[in-house]
Amino acid sequence: MAPALIGLVGVGNMGAPMARRLAKAGHGLILYDLNREAAGALSGEEVGIAVADSLRDLGARCGVVITMLPNADIVRAVVIGGEDAGSLAQGMTRGGVVIDMSSSAPTATQSLGRELADLGIDLVDAPVSGGVPRARDGTLTIMAGGAPKTLDRIEPILAAMGTVQRTGGLGSGHAMKALNNYVSAAGLIAVCEALIVARRFGLDPRTLNAVLNVSTGRNNTTDKKVEQFILNRAFDSGFALDLMRKDVGIAHDLAAGLDLDAPWLKGCADLLDQASRALGAGADHTAAFAYLEQRLTGASRGPEG
Ligand code: NAD
């Protein structure tokens, strides 16, 4: 019997390298993306990857379907309906599993899970951390929430993309991811502000970052972003500012829904809203530095400014 095919919807910055890891691990894949060229290019470069004509078609051919999409509304439209291309649920049969690896909203995930359960389909939330480099290496951290029996069934698939951390019931992975990205975003903003203050004081920003990296101020931004994407003004890490804005907004909604008025979280969400509006769609999250530079000093700078 041929091995079961895995469906993957969304082959953008993250979905494409994740598809390559799955194919290299020997899984047969069927892809769907609104961007048909992106899906077609992947099927051309890797053996064992095909492209579906519609979401219904993909759902009908796969027992397990992964989604790697921008947000909860798009995930719901793809899974349940509202798309010209039909929905996954129109094609999938009872016993199927949807693994939502997008960074989505925990309460939306829980209600999608209830709708799918009525159709006999299981939902797992399995968002990831590590960005494009670790998606390429297959070393993502995968935060998986859902029924333990379903997680047992799909863990061998997830293992091709990274290390699974079980977080609890459905929605817990998405809550975990939003809180992780809040902590990461707060660190980014703090480092950007420190770089700008340092420069005005006459302290070389490169020196500042080098010392932070061997001191208690070290974080993911000092380690993986300042030299690589910020001080050289490349601003091209592959993670959009608007996606970070979405994630911190989810964390803020989560806190507010639990009657928790978290001031740092609110400040961070507001700042990312403003930065995202100012820089527009397409800006990388590391360009938050340029936004803060403009806001604090009134000046925008050229390369290495
Ligand atoms: P992306 O914008 O690069 O890719 C999204 C893909 O989804 C695109 O190819 C787009 O064409 C496709 N798409 C959008 N709507 C669709 C629809 N209705 N039907 C089919 N395809 C559709 O985004 P990304 O950076 O790959 O992020 C994907 C998810 O992963 C997001 O939830 C993001 O927050 C999360 N994430 C991203 C990173 C990162 O570093 N980029 C890291 C961790 C998590």
Image: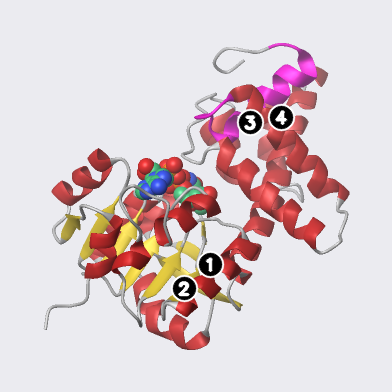
- Amino acid of disc 2: Leu
Asked whether the beta carbons under mark 3 and mark 4 sit within 8 Å of each other, the answer is yes
Q: Residue at x 70, y 35 (%)?
A: 273
| Residue occupied by mark 1 | 112
Asked whether the beta carbons under mark 2 and mark 1 sit within 8 Å of each other, the answer is yes
Number of the front mark, 4 or 2: 2
Residue 180 location (% of width, % of height) = 65, 57
Sort mark 2 into few (<14), some (14-19) or many (20+) by Cα contacts within 10 Å: many
**Residue 152 vertical position relative to residue 244 in the rendered view, above or below:** below
| Residue occupied by mark 4 | 274
First of labels 1, 4 by sequence position = 1
Q: Label 4 to label 2, Cα distance in Å?
A: 36 Å
Asked whether the beta carbons under mark 2 and mark 3 sit within 8 Å of each other, the answer is no
Q: Provide the residue span drawn in magenta.
A: 280-299
Number of the front mark, 1 or 4: 1
Q: What's the mark number on residue 276?
A: 3
Q: Is residue 187 visible?
A: yes
Residue 56 location (% of width, % of height) = 28, 61
Sort mark 4 into few (<14), some (14-19) or many (20+) by Cα contacts within 10 Å: some
Q: Residue at x 75, y 47 (%)?
A: 217
Q: Is mark 2 within 8 Å of ligand 1?
A: no
| Residue occupied by mark 2 | 116
- The quadrant of the image that shows the C terminus is top right
Asked whether the beta carbons under mark 1 and mark 4 sit within 8 Å of each other, the answer is no
- The secondary structure that most of the magenta stretch takes on is helix
Q: Label 1 to label 3, Cα distance in Å?
A: 28 Å
Residue 105 location (% of width, % of height) = 61, 58
Q: Label 1 to label 4, Cα distance in Å?
A: 30 Å
For this rendering, which residue is in front, 91 or 205?
Answer: 91
Q: What's the mark number on residue 132?
A: none
